[in-house]
Image: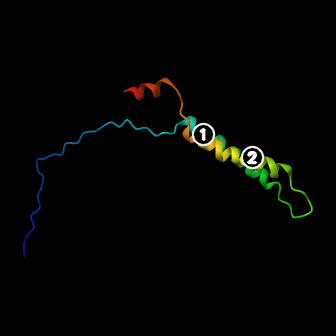
Amino acid sequence: MASTKHKKNIGKQRQTSTVSSSWKFPLDSHNYKILGIGAVVIAIGYALMSTGISDDPSQWNNPLAVTIAPILLAIGYCAIIPYGLLARKKNSEVLNTDSE
């Protein structure tokens, strides 16, 4: 049977250096405001769509549910939410960090 030897690093310390990262989370408060507006528009679209539900098949549905609600949903999903994800705030801080 072979005995195993455990090496101990007595007296040796690891040298660790902290490297500052220049990466920042890409979304800031400006983006969250736009995304919040998009969520509100989508919620209004779904609320308007739910007003058109009728049990009587001879009754015509609410025009808001048939026309305005799908338009609001399309604007919310296809315009506001992508803009909120892709928008960048133009200010001097962003320009100064990019040049370094």
Whole-percent x, y for residue 84 in the image:
59, 40
Quadrant (top left/top right/bottom left/bottom right) for the C terminus: top left
**Mark 1 or 2 closer to N-term?**
2
User: In the shown orientation, is residue 51 left or right of residue 6?
Assistant: right
Q: How many marks?
A: 2
Amino acid type, residue under disc 2 in the picture: Ile
Counting from the top left corner in percent of width and height, residue 29 is at: 55, 36
Residue displayed at 7% across by 70% down? 3
**Nearest the camera: 79 or 44?**
79
Residue found 28% across the figure and 39% down from its top = 18
- Residue 72, numbered label: none
| Element carrying mark 2 | helix
Task: Give the amino acid at mark 1.
Answer: Tyr
Residue at position x 62%, y 38% in the image: 34
- Judged from the image, the secondary structure of the residue bearing numbered disc 1 is helix
**Along the horizontal axis of the image, is 56 left or right of 78?**
right
Q: Which quadrant of the view contains residue 80? A: top right
- Mark 2 nearby-residue class (10 Å; few <14, some 14–19, many ≥20): some
| Quarter location, residue 55 | bottom right
Q: Is residue 86 above or below residue 89?
A: below
Which class describes the residues within 10 Å of circle 1: few (<14), some (14-19), or many (20+)? some
Is the N terminus in the top left, top right, bottom left or bottom right quadrant?
Answer: bottom left
Residue 6 lies, in percent from the top left, at 11, 61
Q: Is residue 47 above or below residue 19?
A: below
Which residue has dot 1 on it?
83
Left or right, residue 51 beside residue 15 = right
Question: Residue 47 versus residue 100: which sits nearer the camera?
Answer: 100
- Which residue is denoted by mark 2 in the rendering? 71
- How far apart are labels 1 and 2 at the CA level? 17 Å
Residue 48 coordinates in the image, percent (x, y)? 78, 50
In the image, residue 49 sits, relative to residue 22, either above or below, namely below
